[in-house]
Image (spheres, rainbow, N blue to C red):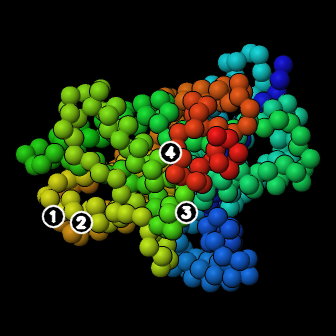
Amino acid sequence: MNKIAVVLFNLGGPDSKQAIEPFLMNFFTDKNIIRAPYPVRWCLAKLISKKRSKQEAGESYAELGDRSPLLDNSQAQATALEKLLSKDKDNQYKVFVCMRYWHPMADEVAGQVKEFGADKVVMLPLYPQFSTTTTRSSFQAWDKAVRKHGLTAPRNGICCYPWEAGFINASVDKISKVYKQSLKKYEGKNPPRILFSAHGLPEKVVNAGDPYQWQCEQGAEKIVAALKAKDKLFENVDWQICYQSRVGPLKWIGPSTEEALKKAVEDEVPVVIYPHAFTQEHVETLVEIDIEYRELAEEWGIVGMDKVDTVGIHKAFIEGLGTLVQQSLKQEGVLPDGGVRLCPKNWSDCCQNIEGAK
């Protein structure tokens, strides 16, 4: 019986008020986030983390009791996935959560995987869409930790799954319920507009070849197509994609979620917001969308606003992750869902270019 370690990668978040500044420091010193020489990056990170820990980020985490729920929510997904995988009697599975910018980070988790005595390691990000700023950064940190600990077990992985069937089905189920409630709530008004709100990126990152925006937009289209296939109610559904969480002076991809909300006010339509680039609740969904954007939308006079929860531990999503693990065990290296390249060739920072695949 093989011992299989499944490592779920996520961003991480502070676990106390005192952890907010060092968490932000870890984030902004990442070369994938601020693409400048280390001395410049360190100085910028120090300035930004100190300022944001006392202002925007500090205030946001204060709404959540000065800590992020991201680890707890990721661990719930890990527990659900391990329970599912345990049905395979030919292998012994243990699912680990590995955070990029706060504990448990790669160095700690790689040591745990070695102690477990893994025969194989499956790397599985909790980001459905690939970006150099998320998945690549996590994989780089993991590879460094693996070398440090002398972890020699073969490693396979999934780099992205933006339209994996379980993720799509869970999204459709979640959206359908909230949309129908919204339709009833605002009866007599224009039908709701679905806003797919993804975390933004600076334009220069995308222009350099990062496929994240393309995957987000393709994924939104496929979720809408699945909604239409499931229920005639969605045949002419109004929807658009938008991007949240802008930081700093650079130009970011758009339209922004704020702009999308203003447009909804102008068009006199209620909105149903679905954060399809997040797979569990954390500060961007619980505070930025649920509190900050809601307050702005109400101030601007929106007809109504409802939020769809992330896929979390939805049965279809967890089953989809299980399928990805089984798929990865049959392949070599790091590949997308389905085992073949998803991104067009013009996306030069596609994981398949990084991994040397064609």
Secondary element at tag 1: helix
Category of crowding for the residue at label 3, using alpha-carbon neighbours closer than 10 angstroms: few (below 14), some (14–19), many (at least 20): few
Residue 235, horizontal then vertical, whole percent:
20, 33
Tell me the residue that label 2 is attached to. 262
Tell me: 196 left or right of 98.
left
Q: What residue type is labelled 3?
A: Ala
Residue located at (69% from left, 60% from top): 102
Residue 158, horizontal then vertical, whole percent:
64, 38
Q: Is residue 134 above or below residue 233?
A: below
- Alpha-carbon span between mark 3 and mark 1: 34 Å
- Alpha-carbon span between mark 3 and mark 2: 30 Å
Tell me the residue that label 3 is attached to. 208
The mark that comes first in sequence, 4 or 1, is 1
Tags 3 and 2 touching, CB below 8 Å:
no
The mark that comes first in sequence, 3 or 2, is 3
Number of the label disc, if any, that sits on residue 266: 1
Q: What residue type is labelled 2?
A: Lys
Secondary element at tag 2: helix
Q: What residue type is labelled 4?
A: Pro
The mark that comes first in sequence, 2 or 4, is 2
Tell me: 46 left or right of 113.
left
- Alpha-carbon span between mark 2 and mark 4: 33 Å
Tell me the residue that label 4 is attached to. 344
Q: Locate the N terminus and report the quarter of the image it occupies.
A: top right
Tags 3 and 4 touching, CB below 8 Å:
no
